[in-house]
């Protein structure tokens, strides 16, 4: 039971990060390897403001989200826009390059060791019968569910959301309808990175430290979650995120904690072999 | 008419190449062993050779086959571990000379990596692009986690997990590295010049068109991937014999990326590019020890800049050919596809 709650808590962080992957992939078919490292930057921002400048957690959270959003847009403008017409392999390799650049810059600036992030919230744990639920877990789950609902409304109701859906359906037709491709793509990166910023703070609430390589595994698992749920699909990413979080927690509960990375990738491979588009994915037919 | 009249006969070309290669191999080995190259430099040269094999192998999968596998460190780990365990057990027997049995260990490393590569390739190669990248990455991570924890499951000491496998006979020397690099280059070169190689290139250029022309794309993709895994395993085996100590941590995702950087910078689809960039990227950090903390930053910046401004890498898909070179020098127009030993590309 406790492990299940842990799983839901990590799962909701994965889901938030997976949404970013999924949206970017849906719109420009790019596996944004740097997404995980944006989370790392968010965590360092929170750490820097709280531990070094003594700011309140709320300022730290807002700053982390803003920094992540700006970083996401900058990466898109500098590294991905020049390559929009290039083969997908070049784009993917560039994304890997950006990811490693961020990791190594962080290592150079902050050192290789992990930095302890002060507790962001202090909520007393709830006790329901025999199970005690930590305040962090509740906050994480509530915040991520609210973010996901807001995102769904944004995509379904707003004008920008409509543009995003149009671009991901058919880029050229969307342009002919007068949708600005550059604006829409930048907006997608901004939203995805803002979600990563929220995710980074929630991740720090659960595992209170920031290290240069923290984005690597987290990003990979979130990507696995996005693929698992069907990439390009918002509910898919959420389901995938929770599934990965639960699988990890249950693997730990069974005493297999050293194997949990392998379990996650094994699930990914199984799902892809059985249903290559993921659980809720659209079937994309490649045209000649 | 004019062209064919001036061509050298085929057997003579083979003979010239073989003689040149053997002469180069023997003279450079003698030179290295004569003591005029310090042990430190010999080590750097051997490491260059191992990285060359890795780059050549990944170039086969990325540059020629057009896929992006990110799990090659896993194959390297398999090659390293299988050869290391084999060498440890076999040299424990009396009357076995480690250096005499080493070729067998290298071959075993390659074969096991190729076998796993084949098993992984069957499901993984059904996917394209990013999916293939992530699924091979997954397999690579699984291999690493298994090597790290297999001892607890089996209950006896096998890979020694995170404590690292020690006391591997140090059998990698200049001669057998040189030989392996040359053989790798030679085999990949001849395969790529054959009709199998043309099928692989056709898949890279347009998979659907290749399939429509009657090329068995599944077969050739698996074939290219398995061959690539084989040579990566060979490099792993040499690496184990070079260091004498291996641990799963050395074969993580970072290692796969390092190999990828080498291939991309050299130019995807150019063997000469892979060899040059492997040499430069191995030797340069040794020269610039003082700036070692900036190394990875420089790598990643280089990767982004090359992708934006010169996506074909430094050598494009240019490949070295002795006969073309001689033809240019001698004013001949002969541009024939001679399967040659690439011995002259080394160190």
Image (spheres, coloured by chain):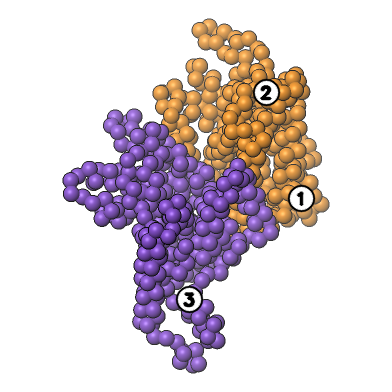
Chain colours: A orange, B purple
- Disc 3 and disc 1: Cα gap in Å? 49 Å
The chain ID associated with circle 1 is A
Q: Position of residue B57 (x, y in %)?
A: 45, 57
Name the residue rendered at 42%, 39% in the picture.
Answer: B248
The chain ID associated with circle 3 is B
Name the residue rendered at 62%, 55% in the picture.
Answer: A90
Q: Is residue B310 left or right of residue B287?
A: right
* In-front residue for pair B213/B338: B338
- Disc 3 and disc 2: Cα gap in Å? 65 Å
Q: Name the residue under label 2.
A: A143
Q: Which mark is residue A181?
A: 1
The image quadrant of residue B310 is: bottom right
Q: Which of marks 3 and 1 is in front?
A: 3
Q: Where is residue A5 in the image (x, y as percent from the top left)?
A: 54, 19
- Disc 1 and disc 2: Cα gap in Å? 31 Å
- For the residue carrying disc 2, how many other residues have a C-alpha within 10 Å: few (<14), some (14-19), or many (20+)? some
Decide which of tag 1 and tag 2 comes sooner along the chain: 2
Q: Mark 3 points at which residue?
A: B322
- For the residue carrying disc 1, how many other residues have a C-alpha within 10 Å: few (<14), some (14-19), or many (20+)? some
Q: Is residue A273 visible?
A: no
Please, is residue B182 above or below residue B257 in the view?
A: below
Instruction: Assess whether mark 1 and mark 3 are in contact (beta carbons under 8 angstroms).
Output: no
Instruction: Assess whether mark 2 and mark 1 are in contact (beta carbons under 8 angstroms).
Output: no
Q: Position of residue A108 (x, y in %)?
A: 64, 38
Name the residue rendered at 45%, 87% in the picture.
Answer: B7
Say what secondary structure mark 1 lies in.
Answer: helix
* In-front residue for pair B121/B146: B146
Q: Where is residue B8 in the image (x, y as percent from the top left)?
A: 42, 86
Residue lying farthest left? B94
């Amino acid at each position: 039971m406790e492990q299940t709650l842990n799983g839901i808590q990590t799962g909701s962080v994965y889901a938030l990060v997976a949404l970013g992957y999924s949206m970017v992939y849906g719109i420009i078919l790019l596996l944004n390897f740097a997404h995980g490292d944006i989370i790392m930057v968010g965590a360092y921002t929170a750490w820097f403001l709280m531990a070094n400048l003594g700011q309140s957690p709320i300022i730290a959270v807002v700053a982390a989200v803003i920094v992540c959003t700006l970083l996401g847009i900058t990466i898109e403008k500098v590294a991905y826009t020049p390559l929009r017409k290039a083969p997908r392999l070049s784009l993917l390799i560039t994304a890997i390059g950006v990811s490693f650049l961020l990791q190594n810059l962080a290592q150079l600036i902050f050192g290789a060791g992990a930095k302890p992030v002060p507790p962001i919230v202090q909520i007393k744990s709830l006790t329901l019968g025999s199970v005690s639920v930590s305040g962090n877990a509740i906050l994480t789950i509530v915040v991520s569910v609210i973010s996901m609902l807001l995102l769904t409304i944004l995509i379904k109701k707003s004008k920008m959301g409509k543009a995003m859906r149009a671009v991901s359906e058919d880029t050229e037709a969307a342009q002919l309808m007068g949708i600005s491709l550059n604006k829409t793509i930048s907006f997608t990166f901004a939203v995805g990175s803002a979600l990563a910023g929220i995710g980074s703070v929630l991740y720090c609430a659960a595992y209170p430290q920031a290290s240069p390589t923290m984005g690597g595994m987290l990003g990979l698992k979130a990507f696995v979650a996005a693929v698992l749920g069907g990439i390009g699909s918002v509910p898919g990413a959420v389901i995938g995120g929770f599934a990965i979080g639960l699988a990890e927690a249950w693997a730990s509960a069974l005493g297999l904690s050293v194997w949990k990375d392998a379990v996650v990738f094994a699930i990914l491979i199984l799902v892809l072999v059985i249903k290559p588009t993921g659980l809720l994915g659209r079937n994309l037919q490649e045209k000649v | 008419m004019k062209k064919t009249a001036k061509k050298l006969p085929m057997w003579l070309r083979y003979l010239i190449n073989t003689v040149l290669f053997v002469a180069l191999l023997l003279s450079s080995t003698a030179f290295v062993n004569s003591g005029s190259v310090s042990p430190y430099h010999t080590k750097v040269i051997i490491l260059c050779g191992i990285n060359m094999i890795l780059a050549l192998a990944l170039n086969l999968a990325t540059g020629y086959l057009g896929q992006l596998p990110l799990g090659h460190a896993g194959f390297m780990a398999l090659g390293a571990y299988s050869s290391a365990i084999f060498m440890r057990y076999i040299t424990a027997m009396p009357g076995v000379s480690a250096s005499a049995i080493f070729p067998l260990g290298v071959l075993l490393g390659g074969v096991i990596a190729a076998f796993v590569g084949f098993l992984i390739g069957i499901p993984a190669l059904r996917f394209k692009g990013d999916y293939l990248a992530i699924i091979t990455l997954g397999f690579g991570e699984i291999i690493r986690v298994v090597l790290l924890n297999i001892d607890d499951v089996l209950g006896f000491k096998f890979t020694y997990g995170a404590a690292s496998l020690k006391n591997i006979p140090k059998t990698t020397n200049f001669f057998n590295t040189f030989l392996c690099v040359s053989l790798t280059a030679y085999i990949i070169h001849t395969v790529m010049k054959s009709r199998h190689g043309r099928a692989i290139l056709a898949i890279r250029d347009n998979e659907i068109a290749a399939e429509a022309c009657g090329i068995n794309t599944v077969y050739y993709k698996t074939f290219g991937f398995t061959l690539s895994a084989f040579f990566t395993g060979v490099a792993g085996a040499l690496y184990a014999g070079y260091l004498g100590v291996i641990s799963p941590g050395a074969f993580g995702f970072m290692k796969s990326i390092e190999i990828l950087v080498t291939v991309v910078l050299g130019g995807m689809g150019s063997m000469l590019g892979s060899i040059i960039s492997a040499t430069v990227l191995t030797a340069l950090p040794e020269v610039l020890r003082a700036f070692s903390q900036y190394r990875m930053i420089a790598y990643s910046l280089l990767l982004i800049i090359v992708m934006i401004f010169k996506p074909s890498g430094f050598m494009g898909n240019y490949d070295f050919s002795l006969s073309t070179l001689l033809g240019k020098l001698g004013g001949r127009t002969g541009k024939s596809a001679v399967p040659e030993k690439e011995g002259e590309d080394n160190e």
